[in-house]
Image (cartoon, rainbow, N blue to C red):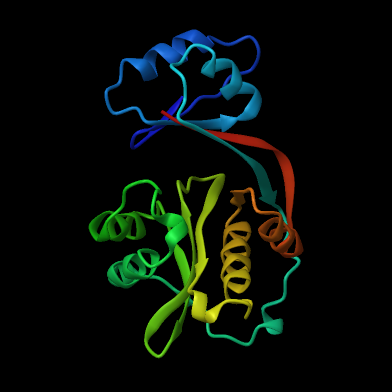
């Protein structure tokens, strides 16, 4: 079981100690969320208090990028720790991220410095208008997160180009990119890039 801020991600092959997982969460005063494979979370949830919100998402991975950046002639830049403040300012403008896990400039800078995360972005008139990032990077995989574009710059393929570059870089390093989505339109875009669904992912809020 992984703890990330106030969120827990349990995993186990049948049979596993679902009640023991639940007891660890219940006894943690900071516990607010649980997420993971649907089959695992549904079993653990039977031992937890009633949830406030439940969300089902598709879990997808990419082993080969099918997207050509040539189709979108835009300059893609890789973030450095010095870009942390600009990235945070950009993400704070995205309504969908209002309830995301807590983050701040210093945390983002640290993650970029340590390799826990990376980001690719597009700028217009000196400001970031589109970006995609990774989190929880390890030697085998990385989670694609924070895929967004300002409303004024949507429908230009910027976010797709950012995700495709991230995936190309990760695969070249022997890492498998993965992500979650629940928007069919977003899913279609990810599949054009090269992602394929591998399961269902649940998110519970308590």
Give whichever of 162, 35 is nearer the camera: 35
For this orientation, the residue located farthest to the left is 106
Left/right placement of residue 106 relative to residue 46 reads left
Left/right placement of residue 94 relative to residue 66 reads left
Left/right placement of residue 158 relative to residue 96 reads right
Give whichever of 6, 155 is nearer the camera: 155
Query: How far across and how far down the image is residue 135, in percent?
Result: 45, 51
What's the residue at 48%, 45% (across, down)? 138
Q: Is residue 32 above or below residue 165?
A: above
Left/right placement of residue 60 relative to residue 105 reads right
The quadrant of the rendering that contains the C terminus is: top left
Give whichever of 138, 27 is nearer the camera: 27
Q: Is residue 170 above or below residue 53?
A: below
What's the residue at 58%, 33% (across, down)? 202
Query: How far across and how far down the image is residue 89, in percent?
Result: 32, 69
What's the residue at 52%, 18% (across, down)? 45
Q: Is residue 172 above or below residue 40?
A: below
Query: How far across and how far down the image is residue 70, in percent?
Result: 69, 83
For this orientation, the residue located farthest to the bottom is 125
Query: How far across and how far down the image is residue 156, in percent?
Result: 62, 81
Q: What is the total number of numbered labels drawn onto the structure image?
A: 0
């Amino acid at each position: 079981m992984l703890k990330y801020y106030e969120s827990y991600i349990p995993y186990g092959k049948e049979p596993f100690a679902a009640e023991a997982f639940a007891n660890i969460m219940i006894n943690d005063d900071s516990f607010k969320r649980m997420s993971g494979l649907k089959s695992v979370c549904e079993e653990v949830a039977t031992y937890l208090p009633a949830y406030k919100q439940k969300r089902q998402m598709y879990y997808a991975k990419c082993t080969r990028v099918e997207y050509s950046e040539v189709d979108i002639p835009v300059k893609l830049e890789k973030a450095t720790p010095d870009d942390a403040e600009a990235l945070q300012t950009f993400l704070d403008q995205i309504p969908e991220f209002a309830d995301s896990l807590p983050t701040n400039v210093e945390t983002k800078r640290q993650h970029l410095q340590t390799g826990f995360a990376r980001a690719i972005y597009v700028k217009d008139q000196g400001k970031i208008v589109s970006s995609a990032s990774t989190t929880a990077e390890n030697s085998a995989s990385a989670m694609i997160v924070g895929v967004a574009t300002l409303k004024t710059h949507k429908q230009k393929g910027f976010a797709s180009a950012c995700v495709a570059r991230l995936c190309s870089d990760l695969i070249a390093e022997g890492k498998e990119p993965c992500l979650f989505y629940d928007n069919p339109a977003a899913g279609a875009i990810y599949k054009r890039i090269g992602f394929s669904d591998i399961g269902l992912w649940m998110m519970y809020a308590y």
